[in-house]
Image: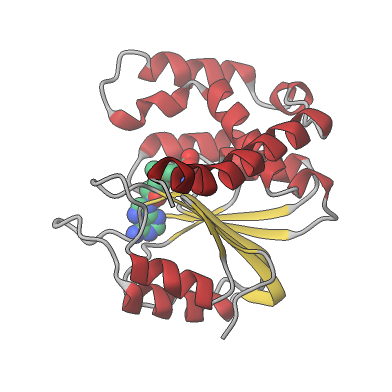
Amino acid sequence: MKLSRKILKFTEPLMYRRGWRRAQRSIFRVPLGPMVAKIDQQRAREIQQRYANSTAGYAKYANIEPWLRLNRERVQDLNLQRSAPKRVLDLGCGGGFFLFILKNLGHSVLGLDIERVVLFTELLELFEVPRVVWKISAFEPLPDLGQKFDWVTAFSVNFNLYHPSKERWGTAEWEFFLRDLQAHLTPGGKVFFGLNPLYDGDYYSPELRDLFLSRGASVERERIFFERGLRF
Ligand SMILES: C[S@@+](CC[C@H](N)C(=O)[O-])C[C@H]1O[C@@H](n2cnc3c(N)ncnc32)[C@H](O)[C@@H]1O
């Protein structure tokens, strides 16, 4: 098969799925206005102004509206705007944008993150999104979270990095992590990861992709979705 045809074979379904998600978003809208109206506007402005001249990488999150729009897409792409109330755990929840939207849609939410960035704590307080402070580490189980979840999500994942080497987890670490996650899920509970690219632009090694697939995921570039739960 010619290279151009091979590329088309790979990119066509991807473009189709993206187009489908875009279309769904425009059909099943999620108005942010009423949600934003519930936020303490004065506090939101104060946070934004305080970080306006900050050179810290995370300072961009102080301007909340673009991040709410991005996270609205995440909610829509997982169809959570059309779902009955679910219990959702978001790993590496950051400022809690995703969970803030879900909470407003009637879901019960919990974030989990380290407590390194003060801005994230401020945003979580602004959004009134609860968070468990916990550092996810390779081969260490998550804490008892007092409940099981219908959904576990993680976006722009970077808890899978070793410090300071920035080396990424291999299949053994992910296998341990997925098995442990299973204990925190209701039967058939869904899991979604949005991975960050590796430095060479790839999202995973072929072995890791195979592991995700063998555990029941659909894998679409950075999107790893265990829509029917984890398979062991
Ligand atoms: C790139 S940010 C993404 C934040 C949010 N998920 C989003 O997409 O807007 C990665 C998040 O993961 C958190 N994080 C990094 N390492 C972690 C670890 N070992 N355990 C828990 N959270 C971690 C960071 O504090 C940060 O909030």
User: Residue 203 appears at what percent x and percent y?
Assistant: 37, 53
- In this picture, residue 209 sits left or right of residue 213: left
- In this picture, residue 181 sits left or right of residue 84: left
User: Residue 156 appears at what percent x and percent y?
Assistant: 43, 46
Q: Where 104 sits versus 92, above or below? A: above
User: Residue 130 appears at what percent x and percent y?
Assistant: 59, 51
- Determine which quarter of the picture holds residue 174: bottom left
Q: Residue at x 57, y 44 (%)?
A: 14
Q: Residue at x 51, y 42 (%)?
A: 8
User: Residue 151 appears at what percent x and percent y?
Assistant: 66, 62
Q: Where 11 sits versus 159, above or below? A: above
Query: How many numbered marks, from 0 up?
Result: 0
The front one of 195 and 208 is 208
Q: Where 203 sits versus 174, above or below? A: above
Q: Where 160 sits versus 34, above or below? A: below
On the question of residue 13 being in view, the answer is: yes
- In this picture, residue 173 sits left or right of residue 46: left
